[in-house]
Amino acid sequence: MQQSLSNRSFDMKKILTLIFCFLLAVTLFGCTSTDESEAFRIWLDEIVFRVLEPGDIGFNQLYLDAETKGVEKVRVSWPEYSLEENRRSIDLSDQLYEELHAFERERLNEDLKESYDVLDWAFEPIAEEYEEPFYYLSNNVLGAYTGNLSDIFITFYYFNINDRQDVENYIYLLDTLDEYGEELLAFERERQNKGYGMPPEEVAITINNIDSVLINGDYTFLKDSFIDKIGATDLEDSAKKAYITQISTDIDEKIDDFYTQIRDGLQQMDIKQVTGVTLYDMPYGKEYYEALIREYTGFDDPEAYLNYVESLIDTYAIRIADYDDIPEGPIFDGNDPNAVIDHIKDAMKDDFPEIEDVDYEMIVAPDAMADLLGATSAFYVLAALDDPLGDQKLTLVGDYSDSDFLTIAHESYPGHMYQNIYDATINKTPDIIRILNIAGYTEGYANYVEEYSAGYADEPVLASYEKDLNTYLTLNCILSDYKMHYSGEDGRDVLAQMIGVGKDSEVISPLIRQLQLSPGIFIKYYISGAMIKDLHQKVNEAAGKTISDLDFHTAILAHGPMPINLLYTYVLNDFSY
């Protein structure tokens, strides 16, 4: 999973007063194609700081030295959740859509046409009737599987500290945790009143997760991280000592108070949502599920999407049945996640284009952080946009075992870390597109290379078998997910039949619960990933010959990140001789 601290996924931010409004006067004078392209490049650079505010937490993570771009550091604050904020975001998105269409696409350079098409997809207005329900449905901020509670630890642990302003921002975030907690609770009360809130069973899971954090209560990893970072600054020793003393005193109390506040608030909240609710039961829930399918896969027709899912289930059932003499393992003969990364980096050289070397280290998530990460097995935090070869933030959730081999590939080489370095250093993808978090591409690609990387294991047959078995199970979960949230059917039947148990069996109840509480969660990984894999065969057909893995991977990376349907168009065009 790729994490970004820029307010979860792409969430349009209000226009900054310190960024002047870009006027498209250049389009009024019959400019040349070169002028049009140059004006478009300038616009791409400028809109980043209208979408991502210097006061947003994500700005700290994504820009180490924004002053070089003429943007002054300001106080950062926790994200706001309200219909008013959503309205401002929508207004900005609509404004950017209009500005985009003031450019003549056909007069742009070829690489800029791709950027144009991606932004046309990203800024396309949604129907007004969907604005409010989609906002409530996409922001389950206290959710058990997709909420913001784990972001507290991730924010402080990975917060960049380069100067006094950064330290003051860190302290301010700590000091305002109580206000942020009340805002999150108020937003959940609002969701409950509107019919989009968490059901009782999800509230119980969130409370249980918080209790685990509070029982653990060890935030030493945050203190150590702060001490290491402030130690590398140019601040006076006396100032460093004073700040360290303050943080060491405050961090335990303020974080404990925040999680206690959320737990108590949920326990006292009037939970109006009903047990077992799915999107099918909610206003505009089906339309939201259709939007998820369309965003992650490009399928406009839910029936065609369903047929594709069912065909994949059949394909993987056959693959699993064809395995003979599966070795016992281990998948990889090593005892450290960084040894896995080193090994894969060397093994993939003939199959993927070369990129610049970086220093990396995958850490194991501290217990308190892991308690709130739900089903997440690992994650990569996007490196700073202005320092893409710098600090690479990789985290494994839980102690390492050889079964993590492919998960590590997903996050590092040739997955998210490699993918982002390629985007920044070879593609030179505009920053505005890099912060969009186009999940169908980023997670689809990473899941595709996760499966592909089985060939790099010490026991490739075992690695492939375990991945195929996992994919087969997950595809059935995706089918169950569709039936629950889109068709209004009992999703338990699909999994019960696959496993060979009754639909009330405790064997499938954890899976059903996760699917119920996090609609569409697996689509961007497994369906988008399968579509990228299928694209290789379509490329071979278009070219009239077999295209090497290296050439195919180069094409995928050269055009990304973009929605899967656009990726198909551009890559197939490359090989249509």
Image: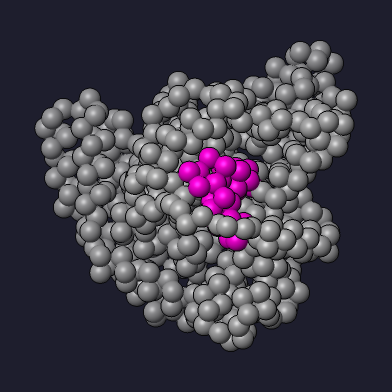
Does residue 86 lie above or below 161 as drawn?
A: below
Rendering coords of residue 71 (x, y %): 47, 27
Q: Residue at x 47, y 57 (%)?
A: 328
Which one is in front, 6 or 522?
Answer: 522
Residue 478 x, y percent position in the rendering:
67, 65
Q: Position of residue 389 (x, y in %)?
A: 45, 26
* Horizontal relation, residue 525 to residue 38: left or right: left
The answer to which image quadrant residue 148 occupies is bottom left
Where residue 574 sits, quadrant-wise, is top right
**Residue in the image at 40% along x and 45% along y:** 333
Magenta span of residues: 444-470
Point 34% across, 55% down: residue: 399
Examine the structure image and report whether residue 184 is included in the region drawn in magenta. Answer: no
**Residue 52 visible from this viewpoint:** no
Going by the image, does 390 lie left or right of 462? left
- Total number of numbered labels? 0
Question: Which residue occupies 61% across, 43% down?
Answer: 452
Along the line of sight, which residue is nearer the eye, 454 or 130?
454
Q: Horizontal placement of 547 versus 266: left or right?
A: right
Residue 249 vs 513, above or below: the answer is: above
> Which residue is at the front of the view, 142 or 353?
353
- Left or right relative to 530: residue 436: left
Q: Main secondary structure of the magenta part?
A: helix
For the view shown, which residue lies furthest in the front direction?
325
Location of the C terminus by quadrant is top right
Q: Is residue 40 visible?
A: yes
Is 516 above or below relative to 361? below
Q: Is residue 449 magenta?
A: yes
Where does residue 227 sit, x and y in percent of width and height?
Answer: 21, 39
